[in-house]
């Protein structure tokens, strides 16, 4: 009788012990797991002077020789280190814009800036640009633009009437270690997510 | 005299070819572009090492200085690229100098990231093991507590009774 009672108690103990082990292990696993979060990369552009009271396609006029000092702010919330590149292109009101999936590869590239960004950090990258000169051909104004002191690059074939309605387009690209090349945007849950900005200006 | 003519032509050709190499040394150009390519590869490798270290559990605080160093290496690599495009001897020398600086920093970053990742992985393994052992010990203690609830209650009751003060009735019943 006592032997049977001991056996029953042992069985009961094992059942309780195994159940509690499962419960406490699950709690431990949950506590130690990384919190789910939506990963993204944010791209912003600001300037202490030039972009204040900026209204798109309206009031930013840039004179030849004037250097504009802007700053990119890139926020990395991808839960890993990122190697990003910002490609600067020049466009007008008659050229196609990039979108959520496709960059504007047909537009002339004025420059590219690369940077490593730690996870959870916001990096600030200086972007200084100057319209070195402009020239007119067939009624259209074309610009020679210099970025961060690099050699001047022509806006051709992008030109506008009277130098109005130009725009600088900034595309964010991220390095893909698998392909060993930069890809437009950042990897989303199902596909690449395109990130881009634009600033309209008139050349005086 | 006529028989010597082809020989002298060959000699002249050889001299011309040599003079081209003297004007634009091919080995130097090759080495320079090779160093630049290595600098780029090392940057990517260091970047991947940091990503691996993150996966292994290295903290952002530890990796932040490595990212800053990697950006410095990137600046050197970009400078090397700019100088290499100049196409002159000074540009080539500067390009090589900056490429080597970039390679040096990238290699260091890669090494440090691997070390951080390895340490983080070991720490993470210890911590995980410790937490699971604690969970099992807690489950064991709880199982014992549940099974022996009656005994524990009895022991507590007995203790309470033993600790309670005996009321002798202040001698009222003694009379």
Image: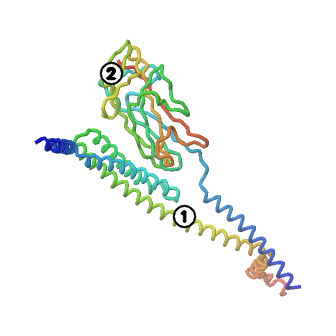
Instruction: Work out which residue is located at the far front of the displayed protein and give it.
Output: B2
**Is B49 drawn above or below residue B175 in the view shown?**
above
Q: Chain of mark 1?
A: B
Is residue A104 visible in the rendered image? The answer is yes
Q: What is the chain identity of the residue bearing mark 2?
A: A
Q: Secondary structure at mark 2?
A: loop
Q: Quadrant of residue A193?
A: top right
**Mark 1, residue position:** B124
CA separation, marks 1 and 2? 58 Å
| Labelled disc at residue A63 | 2
Q: Nearer the viewer, residue B94 or B7?
A: B7
Residue A111 in the image: state x and y as whole percent: 38, 34
The image quadrant where one finds the N terminus of chain B is: top left
In the figure, A177 relative to A103: above or below? Answer: below
Q: Residue at x 40, y 22 (%)?
A: A157
Q: Is residue B77 left or right of residue B146?
A: left
- Tell me what residue is drawn at x 79 percent, y 83 percent: B168
Of B50 and B58, the residue lying toward us: B50
- Where residue A91 sits, quadrant-wise, is top left
How crowded is the residue under tag 1: few (<14 C-alpha within 10 Å), some, or many (20+)?
some
């Amino acid at each position: 009788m006592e032997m049977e009672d001991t056996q029953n108690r042992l069985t009961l103990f094992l059942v309780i012990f195994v159940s509690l082990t499962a419960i406490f292990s699950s709690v431990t696993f949950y506590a130690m797991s990384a919190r789910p979060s939506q990963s993204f990369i944010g791209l912003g552009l600001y300037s202490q002077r030039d972009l204040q009271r900026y209204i798109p396609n309206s009031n930013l006029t840039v004179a030849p020789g004037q250097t504009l000092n802007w700053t990119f702010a890139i926020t990395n919330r991808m839960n890993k280190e990122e190697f990003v590149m910002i490609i600067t292109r020049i466009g007008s009101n008659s050229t196609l814009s990039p979108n959520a999936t496709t960059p504007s590869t047909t537009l002339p590239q004025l420059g590219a800036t690369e940077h490593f960004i730690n996870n959870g950090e916001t990096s600030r990258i200086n972007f200084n640009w100057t319209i070195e000169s402009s020239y007119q051909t067939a009624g259209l104004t074309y610009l020679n633009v210099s970025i961060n002191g690099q050699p001047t690059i022509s806006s051709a074939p992008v030109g506008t009437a009277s130098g109005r309605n130009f725009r600088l387009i900034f595309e964010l690209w991220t390095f893909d270690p698998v392909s060993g090349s930069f890809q437009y945007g950042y990897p989303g849950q199902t596909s690449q997510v395109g990130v881009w900005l634009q600033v309209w200006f008139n050349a005086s | 005299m006529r028989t010597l003519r082809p020989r002298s032509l060959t000699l002249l050709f050889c001299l011309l070819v040599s003079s081209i190499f003297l004007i634009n040394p091919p080995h130097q150009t090759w080495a320079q572009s090779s160093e630049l390519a290595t600098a780029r590869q090392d940057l990517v490798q260091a970047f991947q090492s940091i990503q691996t270290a993150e996966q292994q559990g290295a903290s952002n605080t530890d990796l932040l200085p490595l990212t800053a160093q990697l950006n410095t290496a990137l600046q050197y690599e970009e400078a090397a690229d700019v100088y290499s495009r100049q196409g002159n001897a000074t540009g080539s020398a500067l390009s090589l100098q900056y490429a080597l600086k970039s390679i040096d920093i990238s290699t260091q970053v890669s090494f440090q990231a691997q070390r951080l990742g390895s340490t983080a992985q070991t720490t993470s393994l210890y911590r995980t093991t410790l937490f699971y052992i604690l969970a099992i010990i807690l489950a064991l203690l709880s199982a014992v507590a549940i099974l022996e609830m009656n005994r524990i209650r009895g022991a507590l009751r007995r203790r309470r009774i033993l600790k309670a003060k005996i009321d002798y009735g202040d001698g009222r019943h003694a009379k």
